[in-house]
Structure formats: structure tokens, C-alpha cells
Image (cartoon, helix red, strand yellow):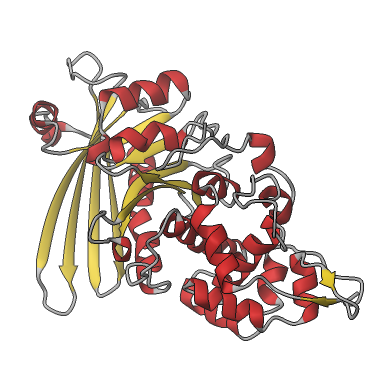
Amino acid sequence: MCRQSATICLIKSPSREHRELPGTAARLASLPDPRARRGRRHSLPSVLLTAACAVLAGARSYFAIGQWARHAPQDTLSRLGFHPRGPLGVRRAASVSTVRRVLVRVCSGGLADLLGHGPDGTESVAVDGKSARGSRTDVAPAAHLLSAVTATGRTVSQLRVPDKTNEITAFTALLDPFDLTGTVVTADALHTQREHAKWLVEVKNAHYLMVVKGNQPNLHAALKALPWKEVTARRYDRERGHGRHETRSVRTLTVTGLGLDFPHVVQAVKILRYRTDLKTGKVTRQTVYTITDMTAREASPQFIGRIARAQWGIEALHHIRDTTFAEDASKIRTGQGPENMATLRNFAINILRDAGHRNIAAGLREISYTPFTRPLDLLGLPLTCDET
């Protein structure tokens, strides 16, 4: 049964072999087609590749995807896998209604897995949620999407949190298919749960770095009472940018034997952040407590500071989806459309970052200058005989 479907779904999740198939088209071909056989004109990979390329070219809606496909030349349609029909051998792209029908019904969990960036070799994976606010209806809340993102800003996968539940119930389902051996999983205070820590260390052979706040009052009080002034293991970092000057202090303390009531905890961490607004001169201070199962030898203050920054970096990904792709303004609401469109946006960001674009908005503009060739080149779709 599909682990990631918010609705009843009898489709099995893609295996590791499927996720590691060479080429986007080959991976998408392993997805079951939700459409009936009768009247099916275009293959599922062709429709999904069309949507992915259109989003890379700047499309934000079903209509925009269909508009991109309608203007695509014959050589582009050939590379996308559309077959020639009729006596003249003309290729016709998928219509807007076909694109909509596929994205509303195709397995969202399978699509997110197959278009995600594998966590192999990454230092850490951050888990956090985001709501697609425009998907809210009069009778249903907005789709809430839980994502796993690597330290380099690539999305591993995402799932939609079922209505009437929260992110806690989806945490293990999101990460379960992936090999996390030796990887540090970071999460905010909501996921600082005993069962999550046990599962990560005992089942996935991973490490954790979890934030502790008021939702764990006893643990938070115990951390706050530790002798932080006597700690010698410290790290200071200074950064200037985005109109502010920030100084971060990271202190680590081994707590084995101190009786902290949390599974596998070895070190406690206190992070102080001072931010000075360069325009107004206003100074803000924030204190964050975290815990980890890593020893002092495995995780120095410098290492923990870097991992913590990667966790905060997931907010940058959400900001890109909101501003560059206008995700919150999207009115896509039906079926699995909100999460599948979010997956296509994540995939576009992954592809652009793999291509060396640090500024995603600038990368989209560059692709828009050659919208019918550059997206296909980035996806590695082969040239046709006519082009070669």
C-alpha cells in the first residue's frame, strides 16, 4: 500500500531500484497509470515530462502547462515521447484536461519519491512542513505537505499529511523508504518525540538533532538548568547579509549519566543567536536548545552549528516556492493536484541547483529564453534522429 497517499490507495511505493533507474523518463515509467485504458492517447511519462518541463520553463498552473505544450515544436514533442499520428505523422501534445486529469489522480507519494534527490552521501536531512494555503476550500483545510530536504537544499521526498492529523503521524512514513545510515536527521520541536528518536537510531541507524521547546516542558527545564557557563566546548560564527549582522554561539555538553529522560541522548546543545538590523540598529536575541545522540567526538560544536543551519535552510526552500513559484497563490485544490504540483516545483529547484544555479528565479528566467530545449536538456532527454 502506498505509504504517502492522503486518500485510499492500493499502489505500492516505488522501490529503491525504481528510484535509481537512469533517466527521469525511465523512473516515471514505473508509476502506475491512474487512467482507464480506453481512450488513452498519451503515455503517462510523456504527460508528466511535459508538466515537469513546463514548470522548469516557468509554468505555475495546469493551463500554463497546457499552453507550453500547445506551442511546443515537433522535435520537442518527439523528445517528450509523443508518437506521430495520422497520415502526415504529426505529433500532438497532451491537452490541458489531460494534464489536469493526470496530476489530480497520479500517486503523489510515488511521484515525489521518483522525482526526489536521494539522500545517499548527504550529511544531514531536515524535516519540516508547509501548507499550500491556496488549496483551502470551504469544506477542507489547505493541503499540508511534509518534506525532507538535504543539507544542500535538494528535496528528497514529500507527503501530504492526512486531514485531522498532524506532522507527527507522517514523520516515519516520509523517511522509511530511504537509507539513512550515518545521516543526521534534524527536525523542529514538534518532532522531538521519544518514538521518533528510537526509530531513527534503532531502526534506521541514523542520528538525530532535535529542537526542544515548551512542548516538552520537563526536558526543556532540565536543559535550561545545565551548567552552560562552565562549558568550554564552544563555537562562534559571524555572518553579514540580508540587511543584518548575525553572531551565533554554539555550546555543547555531554549529558550521559545526568538522567535526561530521552532515548539515546548523549549531548545537549545551547545555541545563542544575536541579530542586529543594520538599518534600524535593533538587536534581537534567541536561545535554542537541542539534543543529539552523537558523541562529542562525532559532533563538535562546529559540526552541530553547521547541521543546525541546514535545518533552518529548509525555510529558504519554502520561501522560494512561495515567492518564485507563487505556491500560496495557486488555486489548485482538487484531488492530489496540490501535492503533485508542489513536487514538480521541488523537482525544478533540484534540477536548477544541480545545474549550478544558486538563484532559482534567475535560473527560471534563463530557461525561459529557450523554453523548448533547455528544460529537456537539463532532464537528460535524448535528441531525436532528426536533431542529431
In the rendered image, the vertical position of residue 292 relative to residue 148, given as above or below? above
Residue 35 image position (x, y, % from top left): 61, 52
- From the viewer's side, name the closer residue of 368 and 301: 368
Residue at (36, 32) in percent of width and height: 208
Q: Which residue lies furthest to the front in this view?
A: 38
The answer, for residue 80, to whether it is visible in the render is: yes
Q: Which of 279 and 17 is in front in this view?
A: 17
Q: Nearer the viewer, residue 311 or 43?
A: 43
**Could you say which quadrant of the image residue 5 lies in?**
top left
Q: Position of residue 215 (x, y in %)?
A: 13, 35
- In the rendered image, which quarter contains the C terminus? bottom right
Q: In the image, 147: left or right of 228?
A: right
Marker count (numbered): 0
Depth check, front residue: 181 or 345:
345
In the rendering, at what x and y percent does residue 352 appear?
Answer: 57, 66
Q: Residue 374, image x and y in percent?
A: 68, 75
Position of residue 170 relative to residue 285, above or below, is above
Q: Which residue is drawn at 29% across and 57% down?
A: 142
Residue 87 left/right relative to 75: right
Is residue 58 visible in this depiction of the protein?
A: no
Quadrant hosting residue 243: bottom left
Residue at x 37%, y 70% (from the top left corner):
330
Residue at image position (27%, 42%) is 188
In-image side of 17 versus 125 (left or right): right
